[in-house]
Image: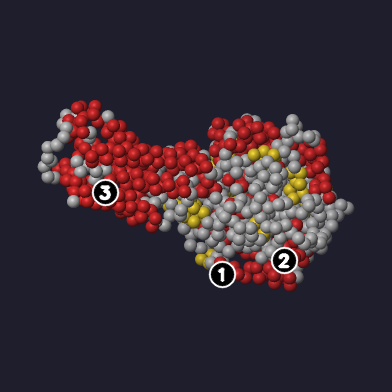
Amino acid sequence: MKLTARTHAIIAALAVFIGLPLLFYALGHVPRRSVLKESISILTLLAFSMMLGQYFLARSNETLLSLFKPPQVQKVHKYIAYTAVCVILIHPFLVVLPRHFEAGVKPWDAFVTMLTTFDSLGILLGLTAWLLLLVLTTTAYFRGRLIPRFTQRYRGWRYFHGGLAVTFTVLALWHSIELGRHTDIAMSAFFVTLALIGFALLARHYWGAPAKKPRTDPVSAGASI
Amino acid sequence: MTIKSIHGCIGCKECVKSCPCDVIRMEHGKAVIAYPADCQICHLCRMYCPVDAIEMAPEKSIPVVLPWG
Amino acid sequence: MTAPNDLPSLSRREFLALSATTAGLAALGLTACADNHVEIDVDAVTNADHSTDVLVIGGGMAGLFAAVKAHDAGAATLIVSKGRLGSSGLTPFAKGFFVFDPATEPGSIDDFVAAVSRSALGTNNPVYTRQLAEHSLERARELRQWGYFDQTLANRPFMRPIDERKIPLLERVVITHLIKEGGRIAGAAGFRLDAEATITIRAKSVILCTGAGGFKPSGFPVCDLTHDGTVIAYEIGAKVTGKEWNDGHSTRSNNPAACYDNWGDMFGRIPSTNGVEVHHDLGMDINYRAYVMGNPVEGGPGSAQPTKAVVGGPYVPEEFQRSGPPAGGPPGQKGGAPGGPPSGKGKGGAPGGPPPGFAASANVGGASAGMAIHKSEGLVPTNDRCASNIPGLYAAGDALGSHMAGGIYTQIGSSLAGSAVQGAIAGEAAAEYARSVTAPSISAARIAEVKNEILAPLRREAGYGPAWVTHTLQGVMIPNFVLYIKKASMMQAALAYVEELRDHHAPMLRAANMHELRLAFETRNMILSAEMKLRASLMRTESRCSHYRLDYPDVDDDNWRAWINIYRGNDGVMRLEKQPFDAWPEQA
């Protein structure tokens, strides 16, 4: 039965974090463009959905931990995070990339215009979120060296990583609702719901039921939140 | 329809500036199709948009006068 | 040899056809006369005052070079443009730039000028034709240096020399008035589109780089050009020429207003240069074919070659006759594009057939209705340096009636190159003039008067919507039996309509906001330009180049080796006079 429950969990996760955004994308009333442009849109949407999925691929998700071993969850968390982060970090470039293949503003000129539109709240949010994500990812990559520097060691790191993630998520979500081509009401509501549940899981994990002692050495097993 | 839709506007005003016929204006930080009847369907707004937010349609929104039919 | 042209009052009997065209306008949702719900506080409109040596009006190819060269000649220079630099008028859509490169051309400049003169049947001013060839290579070199030939959109390459020189630039400003004080130019005035503000600019010299214009037609990207420069200069006494010539671009009958789509990939192309290629591109011939044989017209872009020959029609010199219409290409195939589209074959040529997603469809003309041949209409030059008959007022590009190419589109790519060449010459000439005069003074009373005139449509409690008046004007002027296949009775009939719009509707144009204020002035300008076109076409009792009359179908060298100049008489009435080819106008 264990295997079936695991399979169910995986299918459910895929349905929520890949299926639903694709569904909302398909139902949206935004005109379709070239295959390249639509692929980039879908890739970015899925990457963001995956980033939100990280709240559910963590120690805070007790249901998941009853099905999978923490190191397995941590491994998946890590790989998905690095992949999604890459897409999100390069998505400003992906937005202007198709201009290289068609008439109009040159990609670099478009990029400069976009990034220097400082009177746009959405752009400011996006720039801040991008920088936060860079910090989030860099510190996660070097967590082994960072964890000993926190006064509370692993617990301190956990607050740092979780706090940064929540701040990033709020800014990025706001940014995507402000500017996103496909973030209509349905897509926005979906992202907001995912984020709120994720925050709730995290809050319960941090401040709710007393945390159990870590079952494995956090440093050797890699980090989780 | 002329300019069909604007999705994903970042508010940079490139389209407002580059429209020869003053069709697009800013409203609450976003570009809106303010005077569609004056659109000459030249696509400059679309080509200047850094985030490719503008979709065009070939139909004019008001009847056109032609020299013969 | 001034010959004021008094036109007989018309018989309105032939009006049924025209009236039918305008009958459907009520269904357009374009309300005609109604209350004006003004969206702004007109009394709170502010005025910004600027001052400069040389004022360049217009932000296209001519304006760019006028500003750069005036600045480099030491004059404090200011550019003001209705749109954005390099993104308004016809400049953004012109992709061919003619260059006469002595290293590669088999013929000499003399040969080139002679070929243009033969094709133009003498209508070209050889001084300006030569100037084009002599300076084009140098202008192309500068443009290349600024990155103009590296990408599709002109704004960034145009901004490079302007930024480097820190030349001040006012964009999205509509100029409605030229101001003349003490017999010479003193400045200009207008209003901002993005703010509730008028603008006055005192200038020692003004260069009009305002482009040509049309009747906001369908299928050609000329809807922002309404002969503004010509009209405001006419109002202060400048002479205007070339109004009888016609640009004859056609468009497709499916979605005729879709400029971008109907031109294939042309608007997306990166500009390139081309060498000598002299044509006699009419555009009138397809109008004639449609007029005689009815629709659909054979030989449109992407469709089969015409099988039936059509008798009569505009004269094409034998040397320049083609064996049938050229193979498919953009609708600009005939008559030349802004800046001249390269021909269907050869380097930079347009692809044959319709653009992707567009089936071959029937052709309709009038895409550029209201526009004359590039460089043939505009202010009358009084010398070879783009000066007008108003001291200190210059014009360049399509705002100058230099007749560089003649009353027919002759050299491919010469329009864009000609604007660059003339802009540079006018810039230097204006800077030189500005050094010789003191700063003009404009009285506060005059400025207040101008501001009142500018804001008048906003103050009207009721009036005519500019969109409706424009549409009515289009219904009168665009049918091909008025301005393309001309005859006296029909032109007189149309003139009656235009006079009505001029006398009754133009003074009652209303505007609710700055966008409509612009439309109101554009509409006023189009009405005046329509009157000029009709009067000049009536006066020229022959057919030559792009001017074709059914009642005078032949070239008349005995009487008509002359251009027609138009000016406002002391009584305010439009006057016309002949100016012989190869002669400069008589200076008062």
Residue under circle 2?
C294
Amino acid carrying label 3: it is Ile
- Tag 2 subunit: C
- Residue C9 lies, in percent from the top left, at 76, 67
- Residue A126 lies, in percent from the top left, at 36, 41
In the image: residue C134, left or right of residue A185: right
Amino acid carrying label 1: it is Ala
Give the number of the mark in front: 1 or 2: 2
**Residue at the image position 36 percent from the left and 47 percent from the top:** A45
Same chain for marks 3 and 2? no
Q: Please tell me which residue lies in front, C365 or C169.
A: C365
Q: Callout 1 environment at 10 Å: few (<14), some (14 to 19), or many (20+)?
A: few
Residue C101 to residue C321: above or below: above
Q: Secondary structure at mark 2?
A: loop
Residue under circle 1?
C27
Distance (Cα) linking label 3 and label 2: 69 Å
Question: Quadrant of the rendered structure where residue C384 is?
Answer: top right
- Tag 1 subunit: C
Give the number of the mark in front: 3 or 2: 3
